[in-house]
Image: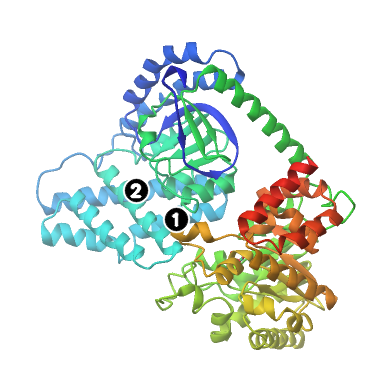
């Protein structure tokens, strides 16, 4: 590429194309960053003439300016408070005083950030910051740091560094994704304390200092940085580290910000102010592109924007195939805040409400009243559309810190979901009562996760019946009839679908787990991620047989695993006769748009052929060819 540009090929973590100026978060020295941008400017002026986006990118250099003030050290109280970085007279007493000042300052920053995040991003994101704030007053976290200073003569910095590493390592060893995230939170808090000790502003200056649209470039984003991403200013994100399931990737997707992660060493050559093209769908980051490349991507970006706008504009149309087959579209949500987005998403209801987030964001089990209020709010926000509430699916990769569940060699095969519910019946009964009470405010259905056999289903259903009976006798309002179904995410349940279909009201296929249990591929393990594929013909056969069994018995089948939100899978699911498709809110417009182009007769033929193909690759090829033909 002319003009010294180059292309980085990495992991596309969140789709979409953006062109803009780079803004390095790991270069907090504002003077240097702005200087870099200015030095680079003349070269770019010649290289990227013309084109609105390119022009906007060229003007981006100004955004680094506000950092100067931040880098100079702002006190959250303002005025002339002594800052924690000022070296006090030596001795443990002075070190402890610096430490206390740094802690107070960090706590105030986190409270302020949480308040901002609550306004702009909702309560669940703010909870991440409040959780970090909690560490600072946690007796297991802060006193050991003081002890290192007082008894071991360490400097405040050494004590923070070592204590944080010690705690983070303990969380990391717990071997599940949620706990690993807590380790990132601890490191984040540690970094904040260290920055406060040195009189800095915790790198947030980087994000908070953003005044113009830019593409963020960073080693990785910390949890407290990710929750501050401002969609209006952050065009895209490129990180050196991270994979498809990293914090940055997940949050970028949920915010709809294109992202490329795992860019590695080549990203070191990017400076603040460089023009970048980020293609989050292809996993590309083009650095200092030449004129022809810029023009090509501007055209692609415009076409993509047009397509997305058209799809979004049509999101309230019913989901109907080209030959008139209507399917229900559900939204997957985890929080009350997401219900609001779901109501505006074009979904026909909530196909999966993952209640575990309500439990994970608390520091003790939420009681019946708290659960009832959350479920009722979701039901009310959906204004009469059905809400499928799944009972607690904890265990596996989702832990509750306050419960101290046992460590297991194979957590996904162990004490998880309905197994815990049937073991701790009191928890399940409390939740079922709360759900039943919410049904007085709008249509609710209940779904049990991780059912492996009829015994579990019958026991769960009997417990629900007893609780409903109790509510009835106590004159507590609830719906007369509440549909009850199971998640089909274990092959044994899929293989016994006929027997289940005689008793349940509905099935919801959880492909995220069904794939891992059918193919013996840990869904969290990146090393075997290449084997994890819902287009595997064995998985397709299970899906087809579940849908057919439900129809034989006059029941319906939904799908709430990730496959339902993949437009490429739409011809198969339509061909199999799937009744309800539930997905992340962001996927709804594109799946509806794909459906509108499909005819159920030809999809049925394709689906019949696909289950007889040998490999997932062959299925993918067949689907791509199919879409190629109907375009
Ligand atoms: C699934 O397994 O497909 C599913 C939707 O449940 P979760 O991802 O919450 O395990
Ligand atoms: Mg699951």
The answer to whether residue 174 is left or right of residue 91 is right
Q: Position of residue 79 (x, y in %)?
A: 33, 34
- Graded by Cα atoms within 10 Å as few (under 14), some (14 to 19) or many (20 or more), the crowding at tag 2 reads many
Q: Position of residue 312 (x, y in %)?
A: 74, 41
The residue indicated by pointer 2 is 106
Q: Position of residue 447 (x, y in %)?
A: 69, 73
Occupied quadrant, residue 508: bottom right
Q: Position of residue 111 (x, y in %)?
A: 43, 50
Secondary structure beneath disc 1? helix
Q: CA distance from mark 2 to mark 1?
A: 12 Å
Which numbered disc, 2 or 1, marks the residue that appears first in the sequence? 2
- Graded by Cα atoms within 10 Å as few (under 14), some (14 to 19) or many (20 or more), the crowding at tag 1 reads many
The residue indicated by pointer 1 is 130
The tag on residue 409 is: none
Instruction: Look at 60% across and 43% down and name the residue there.
Output: 256
Occupied quadrant, residue 141: bottom left
Is the residue under label 1 in contact with that under label 2 (CB below 8 Å)? no
Please state the total of marks drawn on the protein image: 2
The answer to whether residue 121 is left or right of residue 619 is left
């Amino acid at each position: 590429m002319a003009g010294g540009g180059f292309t980085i090929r990495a992991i596309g973590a969140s789709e979409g194309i953006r062109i803009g100026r780079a803004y390095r978060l790991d270069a907090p020295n504002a003077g240097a960053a702005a200087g870099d941008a200015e030095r680079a400017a003349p070269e770019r002026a010649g290289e990227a003439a013309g084109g609105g986006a390119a022009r906007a990118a060229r003007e981006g250099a100004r955004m680094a300016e506000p950092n100067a003030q931040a880098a100079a050290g702002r006190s959250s109280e303002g005025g002339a408070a002594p800052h924690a970085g000022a070296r006090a007279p030596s001795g443990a007493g002075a070190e402890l005083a610096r430490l206390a000042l740094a802690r107070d300052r960090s706590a105030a920053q986190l409270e302020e950030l949480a308040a901002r995040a609550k306004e702009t991003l909702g309560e669940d994101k703010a909870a991440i910051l409040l959780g970090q704030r909690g560490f600072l007053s946690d007796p297991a976290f802060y006193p050991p740091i003081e002890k290192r200073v007082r008894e071991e003569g360490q400097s405040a910095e050494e004590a923070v560094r070592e204590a944080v590493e010690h705690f983070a390592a303990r969380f990391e060893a717990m071997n599940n994704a949620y706990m690993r995230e807590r380790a990132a939170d601890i490191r984040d808090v540690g970094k904040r304390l260290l920055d406060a000790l040195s009189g800095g502003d915790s790198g947030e200056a980087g994000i908070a200092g953003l005044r113009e649209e830019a593409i963020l470039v960073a080693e990785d984003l910390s949890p407290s940085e990710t929750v501050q991403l401002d969609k209006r200013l952050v065009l895209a994100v490129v990180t050196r580290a991270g994979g498809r399931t990293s914090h940055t990737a997940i949050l970028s997707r949920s915010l709809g910000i294109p992202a490329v992660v795992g860019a590695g060493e080549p990203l070191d050559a990017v400076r603040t102010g460089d023009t970048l093209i980020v293609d989050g769908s292809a996993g590309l980051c083009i650095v200092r592109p030449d004129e022809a490349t810029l023009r090509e991507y501007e055209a692609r970006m415009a076409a993509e924007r047009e397509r997305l706008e058209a799809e979004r504009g049509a999101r309230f149309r019913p989901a109907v195939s080209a030959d008139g087959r209507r399917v229900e579209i559900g939204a997957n949500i985890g929080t009350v805040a997401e219900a609001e987005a779901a109501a505006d998403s074009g979904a026909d209801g909530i196909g999966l409400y993952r209640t575990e987030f309500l439990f994970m964001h608390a520091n003790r089990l939420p009681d019946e009243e708290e659960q009832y209020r959350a479920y009722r709010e979701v039901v009310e926000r959906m204004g009469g559309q059905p809400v499928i509430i799944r009972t607690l699916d904890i265990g596996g990769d989702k832990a509750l810190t306050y419960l101290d569940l046992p460590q297991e060699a194979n957590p996904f095969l162990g004490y998880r979901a309905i197994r815990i519910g049937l073991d701790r019946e009191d928890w399940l009964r409390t939740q079922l009562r709360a759900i039943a009470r919410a049904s007085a405010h709008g249509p609710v259905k209940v779904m049990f996760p991780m059912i492996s056999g009829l015994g579990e289903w019958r026991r769960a259903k009997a417990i629900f019946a007893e609780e409903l009976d109790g509510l009835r006798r106590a004159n507590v309002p609830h719906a007369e009839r509440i549909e009850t179904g199971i998640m089909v995410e274990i092959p044994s349940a899929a293989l016994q679908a006929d027997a289940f279909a005689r008793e349940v009201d509905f099935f919801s296929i959880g492909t995220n787990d069904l794939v891992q249990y059918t193919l013996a591929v840990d869904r969290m393990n990146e090393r075997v991620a290449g084997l994890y594929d819902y287009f595997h013909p064995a998985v397709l056969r299970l899906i087809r047989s579940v849908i057919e069994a439900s129809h034989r018995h006059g029941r319906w089948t939904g799908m709430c695993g990730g496959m339902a939100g993949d437009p490429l899978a739409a011809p198969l699911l339509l061909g199999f006769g799937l009744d309800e498709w539930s997905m992340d809110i962001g996927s709804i417009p594109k799946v509806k748009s794909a459906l509108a182009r499909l005819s159920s007769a030809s999809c049925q033929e394709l689906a019949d052929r696909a289950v007889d193909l040998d490999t997932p690759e062959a299925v993918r090829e067949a689907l791509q060819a199919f879409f190629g033909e109907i375009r």
